[in-house]
Amino acid sequence: MSSLSKISVLPADLANQIAAGEVVERPASVAKELLENALDAGASRIELSLTGGGLKELTVIDDGFGMSPGDARLALQRHATSKLRAFTDLDSLCSFGFRGEALPSIASVSRFELTTREATRDEATVVTVLGGKDPQHRSAGGPVGTKVSVRDLFFNVPARLKFLRSTSTESGHVSDVFVALALGRPEVTFVLSRDGRTVRKLPKVKTRRERAIQVLERDDLRHVRGERGPLHIEAFLAGPESARNGASGLRFLVNGRPVRDRALAQAVAQTYGSTLERGRYPVGVVFLDLPPHLVDINVHPQKLEVRFAEARAVFDALFQVLSKELGYATEETLTKASAPNVRPFSRDRAPSPRAEAPLSPPEERQTLRVRASVAEEVPSIRPETLRAFELKDSAQPGRSRLRFIAQLRRSYLICEGREGLVILDQARLAERVLCSRLWNDFLEGRTRAQSLLFPIQVVVPEGLEHVLSLAEPLTQLGIEVRAKSDTVATIHSVPDALSHAPPEAVLAIVSQTLRESADLSPHERLRKLTACLGDAFCLKRGQTLGPGEASSLLSNFDELGATFEGPSPIVHRVSFEELDGGRAEPVPSSERPERSSEPSAPEASIFTQEPQDSGETQRPTKAKLSAEEPEAPRPRESGERRTTDQEQSAVPAPGAKRRSRGG
Ligand SMILES: Nc1ncnc2c1ncn2[C@@H]1O[C@H](COP(=O)(O)OP(=O)(O)OP(=O)(O)O)[C@@H](O)[C@H]1O
Ligand SMILES: [Mg+2]
């Protein structure tokens, strides 16, 4: 028997090319990495120039502190960084870079040249790399600072070129990265040239405000500031009249790092209340600054996303600060929804890195997680202080609108629809949202996955073969699993939509579901899997939802085209007619007042009263308030009793949901 090992370590150029798959997606990723390096090097002026959309050539020149000849050589080695020494440094990191993988990754898929000189040296060092092959070094003349030139990107991985768009689209992505980074560093001059022509020059300025005006090229931005505990919020936002479809004109910088975050964008849009139609977002920039240990920046291969240790607190704080300062909501609502309702941040909690996650059994982990998040919730904003929202009720023909009013028993979302009262089961709504997101993204080939910096090793006692037989579609679903042995696998990525779930728990559901559905077609098995994942990792009952979160859930539901119909009911309706006991005409929606001018307390109080209360003590229904009819004793027998009955029928016995899917 041969003693030759089957395993060999990949050569550096191949390993770098593989790593480049994650870091370098397109010219804009190269621009981002090089600009960030220049900023980390303390540059006061940075020039970015591109030819052919950055594919032919992309160069970044900075006047930063440069590198010594020795460091210039090391910089091209994988995991060589001057920015991180220990994992715990991530908790106090102020630089953009920390992984030491950008330069070797870029150099492995291009013709790369770096010229760098420190101020204390007479000569610069030039390092050239051709498609990841051995770096060549020489000395040359050159100014203090660093110039990195990347030519013929992906020349040696033609498959990647197929995924790129037109030159102008790729140029657009590069400009986007350029302005996003420039927004965070007003003290630095940024110059962008395209095909030999300067197209953008942003001279250094003193304040974020000046930079925002320069970048967004408008001076009508509202300047908003606020603080909640250690979180500082500063925003420059245009008015609703210049809002756009989609959130592309709304930027977020967390500790100076441009990030994308759908939930934050929704929180901002919601503060515009009825002045913005659904799906439209304001133009502007929002800066969130908080101590580094309260943000995990190590969650995305290109560092385009972050995870907040206390996401809910950040979300609600942003909503409240902007609502209050922008003034698109009523005075009364704003006063009541201000600071005291937001739980102060706990200063001693850092996001726990995945690598250090305890490997307790998945079910136990999940249970612990859910409990922990319930315990750590921001105390709910009292119902009467809730802002009202109008959202489409997509499941209904004619697309009626839903206006979130309050959360009941931390389990139900009470909303006003066009025809009456709508009560949604939040857990089932959330389940439908998560399941639809996973499935739709998969079908449309636009799943975004989060690579785990440290793949997690998991023992899969049963069913690993089922997982591996569907490894490819699973990767397309965002779940990348590789076998280590017959019963041990490593999980390398999870879909963005499941970034809150412990990866090993995700894998446990995957193996169980695929094992149990072995007799179905691959398509049906994957469909079932998305349903089970949606079920396992959606928001549960018992979790308090802030108004922003509830509305965001509703609008996600709407955007995904998910439906209320399904095996288990998630919606209950009580028409205005029923509420009125058949005696009054429902008030047409056009006569209902705009939500921003509505008093919210009376609506919420409807739901805080016990069904057995006497009619006299109860407030009039929303319909009557809206129509400004004289207050009449409220007929309660049909509407209210029925709500209670249905509510009871909608609450399954504890654990029923899990049992129903056989898990
Ligand atoms: N423009 C520059 N000026 C000075 N030093 C630089 C410059 N670019 C890179 N370096 C040095 O080279 C090292 C490697 O850069 P690289 O971008 O590969 O990794 P990183 O920035 O440390 O981490 P990340 O991979 O997360 O970006 C850096 O840590 C830094 O010391
Ligand atoms: Mg870097």
Image (cartoon, helix red, strand yellow):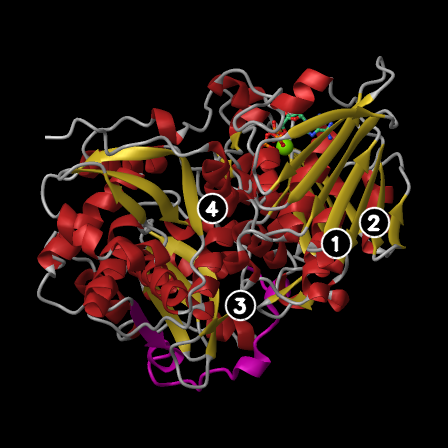
Query: Residue 108 appears in which quarter of the rendering?
Result: top right
- Image spot of residue 486 (x, y percent): 13, 40
Instruction: Provide the residue designation for mark 3.
Output: 390
CA distance separating discs 1 and 3: 35 Å
Residue matched to label 2: 192
Residue in view at x 82 percent, y 51 percent: 215
- Under mark 1, the amino acid is Ser
- Quarter in which the N terminus is drawn: top left
Dot 3 or dot 4, earlier in sequence:
4
Q: Secondary structure at mark 1?
A: helix
* Residue type, label 3: Glu
In the picture of the structure, the residue carrying the numbered disc 4 is 382
Whether the residue carrying mark 2 lies under 8 Å from ligand 1 is answered with no
Q: Are marks 3 and 4 in contact (CB under 8 Å)?
A: no
Q: Position of residue 487 (x, y in %)?
A: 13, 38
- Report helix, strand or loop for mark 2: strand
Q: CA distance from mark 3 to mark 2?
A: 42 Å
Which region of the structure is painted magenta? 571-600
Q: What's the distance in space between the residues labelled 2 and 1, CA to CA?
A: 8 Å
Residue 65 visible in rendering:
yes
Q: Toward which corner of the image does residue 508 lie, by quadrant?
A: top left
Q: Earlier in the sequence, mark 4 or mark 1?
A: 1
Q: Which residue is mark 1?
A: 175
Give the percent coordinates (x, y) of residue 649. 17, 64
User: What distance separates the C-alpha of mark 2 from that of mark 4?
Assistant: 50 Å
